[in-house]
Image: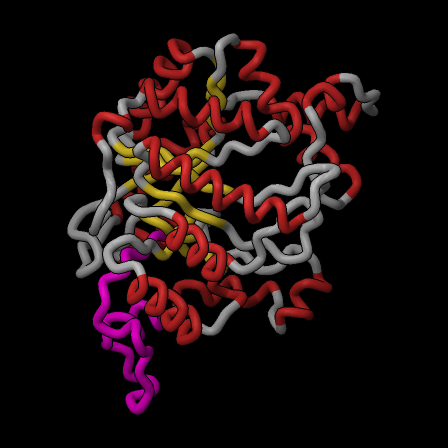
Amino acid sequence: MIRKVSILDRSRTREGHPAPEALRDTVELARAADGLGYHRFWVSEHHSVPGVAGSAPTVLAAAVAAATRRIRVGTGGVMLPNHQPLVVAEQFGVLEALFPGRIDMGLGRSVGFTGGIRRALGRDTADADRFEEQLAELLGWIDGTQRAHPEVHARPAEGLRIPPFVLATGEGAGIAARAGLPVVVGDLRGRARVAEAVRRYREEFRPSPWAAEPYVVVAGTVAVAATEEAARRILLPEAWALARSRTRGSFPPLRPAEEVAALEMTPKERELYEGGLAGHVAGTEEQVAAALAGVAEATGADELLVTTSTYDRTALLDSFTRLARITGLSRSRPGGPGL
């Protein structure tokens, strides 16, 4: 079994519930995760997405850290091409100064997904190609090795220990390996593809002051319930939202599973919807335990990052409670400084 289990919450909005409620839901889920023994709780960055309320991950991470006691808190991730590395270093420096030994810096290489968002951010698609350069600059601001602006210092970040992680989309795994950083790969549906990315990352990894050896986090959706059918119901709202986004160009708020199950769909929507349901780790506690053992064997992952979203918050909390039980989190009580 994978020894550490963590949560990435995207602050998904729900039909009939205002976006601010989604952010409060994220904080409440973090409190529950802290009590259940999860290792980390991360939040994400999305801009102008109707179905996601989390647009300022370092601000939300501060609220999560303030509301919890033990769990590590971070981002999954800050999209570095959207920001100046100095500002990112300063933000994480403030977080680490306020919550010492509990802050992670997960970094991604995506830019705004529409031209309008990119223009509003003052970015374009070419900025994603500068990620490796920006990453090196950011790490230099934190460890005090940057020389491009010798008169400038990233206070209070400089000299603090803030573990960085690279979210591996496209070339991300290679970048993480060259930089000697932990990597986050996903999802659980493409297990052969994930296993190949992990193999290459380990082969190409160069030890660094940030990590002496490879560290792999595998991310994906996990749903656990009393029955296989109840676990499948947890997946329906997100699968429908994904299908809708790919046919209508907009990622909508989540709808109740019962409504989704009753919808009339076009053949294309049905195809995408069924694809969105396939391959996740979902089922009873016994089924999920066996599936996660397979993931561990295939990838050798050091950590599992669970990204489950659904309309029914009670079912979601029950799923995370069951997952904590079958992975033994309440007994291990992970947390504290380091990875």
Work out whether residue 40 can be spotted.
Answer: yes
Which residue shows up at 41% across the image and 16% down it?
Answer: 288
Q: Nearer the viewer, residue 237 or 119?
A: 237
Give whichever of 284, 145 is nearer the camera. Answer: 284
Q: Residue at image x 33%, y 20%?
A: 325
- Answer yes or no: is residue 196 visible: no
Residue 158's place in the image compared with 229, above or below, is below
- Across and down, in percent, residue 98 comes to 31, 64
Outermost residue toward the bottom in this view: 151
**Residue found at x 17% / y 61%:** 209
- In the displayed structure, 60 sits above or below 188; it is below
On screen, residue 333 versus residue 25, left or right, reads left
**Residue 56 relative to residue 301: left or right:** right
Q: How far across and down, in percent of the image, does residue 110 sit? A: 53, 56
Highlighted magenta segment, given as a residue range: 136-165
Q: Main secondary structure of the magenta part?
A: loop
The colour scheme of the drawn protein is secondary structure
Quarter-wise, where is residue 200 in the image?
A: top left
In this rendering, position of residue 46 left or right of residue 41: right
